Amino acid sequence: MANPGRAYDLVVWGGSGFTGRLAAEYLARRYTPGGSVGVGSVAATEPVRWAIAGRDRVKLEKVRDEIEQKHPHARNKIDVLVGSLDDPQSLLRVASSTNTLLTFA
């Protein structure tokens, strides 16, 4: 059962890699990020709160910007989360912010 108290329904870990980017683009095309219902999304009746995550904020933000350019309904709605093995608390923050963590790293 999903925990409604978490910020995201799912987080794509490795969002700046090839496969993670494909997953994020699919989500942007299929669902409106942020859980809001938008006209531009294919599944306007199925809002999903999701974010991309990984180690490098700059790379993740670049991917997010490219996705938002292709999918204007997602503009300012894709959150970027950063975690690092050097900072176990950052990984815990990412993992505990979501119901499902998809890893493509």
Image (spheres, helix red, strand yellow):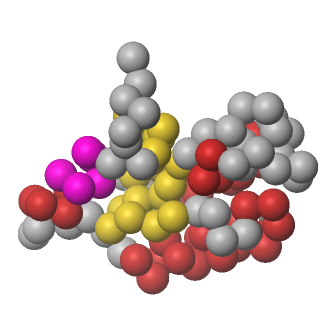
Q: Is residue 69 visible?
A: yes
Where does the image place residue 39, in percent across and percent down from the top left?
A: 89, 49
Residue shown at the point (10%, 59%) measured from the top left: 88
Where does the image place residue 20, in percent across and percent down from the top left?
A: 52, 52
Up-down: is 85 above or below 12?
below
Query: Any magenta on residue 95?
Result: yes
Up-down: is 102 above or below 57?
above
Judge left or right: residue 98 versus residue 16.
Answer: left
Residue shown at the point (48%, 77%) measured from the top left: 59
Residue shown at the point (56%, 45%) measured from the top left: 49
Where does the image place residue 35, in percent across and percent down from the top left?
A: 63, 46
Judge left or right: residue 33 versus residue 80.
Answer: right
Up-down: is 103 above or below 81?
above
* Residue placed most toward the observer, 84 or 104: 84
> Which portion, as a residue range, is magenta?
92-96
Q: Is residue 103 visible?
A: no
Residue shown at the point (12%, 60%) measured from the top left: 89
